[in-house]
């Protein structure tokens, strides 16, 4: 599992890659964190 996040900074957009179910995406703008395990919790793969 992986997720790509694009964040806007002073010099444009920066790409961040989060890989593995143990990865956690920080969302400081809303003072939250998103574990990839939770994002993919209901997803079933064949």
Image: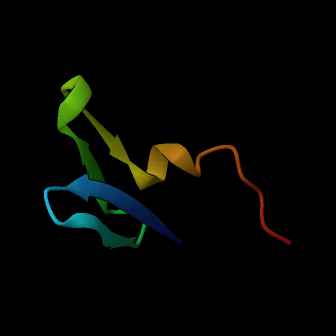
Q: Quadrant of the C terminus?
A: bottom right
Q: Position of residue 36 (x, y in %)?
A: 43, 54
Q: Which image quadrant is residue 16 in?
A: bottom left
Q: Position of residue 23 (x, y in %)?
A: 31, 62
Q: Is 11 situated left or right of 30 in this image?
A: left
Residue 2 higher or lower than 6, as above or below: below
In the foreground, 5 or 26:
5
Q: Is 41 situated left or right of 44 in this image?
A: left
Q: Position of residue 38 (x, y in %)?
A: 48, 43
For the point 47% across and 65% down, which residue is it? 3
For the point 17% across and 66% down, which residue is it? 11
Q: Position of residue 13 (x, y in %)?
A: 31, 64
The colouring scheme, among rainbow, by chain, secondary structure or one colour, is rainbow
In the image as oriented, which residue stretches furthest toward the top?
Answer: 30
For the point 13% across and 57% down, which residue is it? 10
In the image as oriented, which residue stretches furthest toward the right?
Answer: 46
Q: Is 4 situated left or right of 35 in this image?
A: right
In the foreground, 18 or 20:
18
């Amino acid at each position: 599992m992986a997720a790509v996040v694009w964040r806007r900074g002073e010099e444009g957009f920066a790409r961040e890659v989060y890989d593995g179910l143990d990865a956690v995406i920080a969302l400081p703008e809303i003072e939250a964190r998103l574990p990839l395990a939770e994002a993919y919790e209901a997803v079933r793969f064949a």
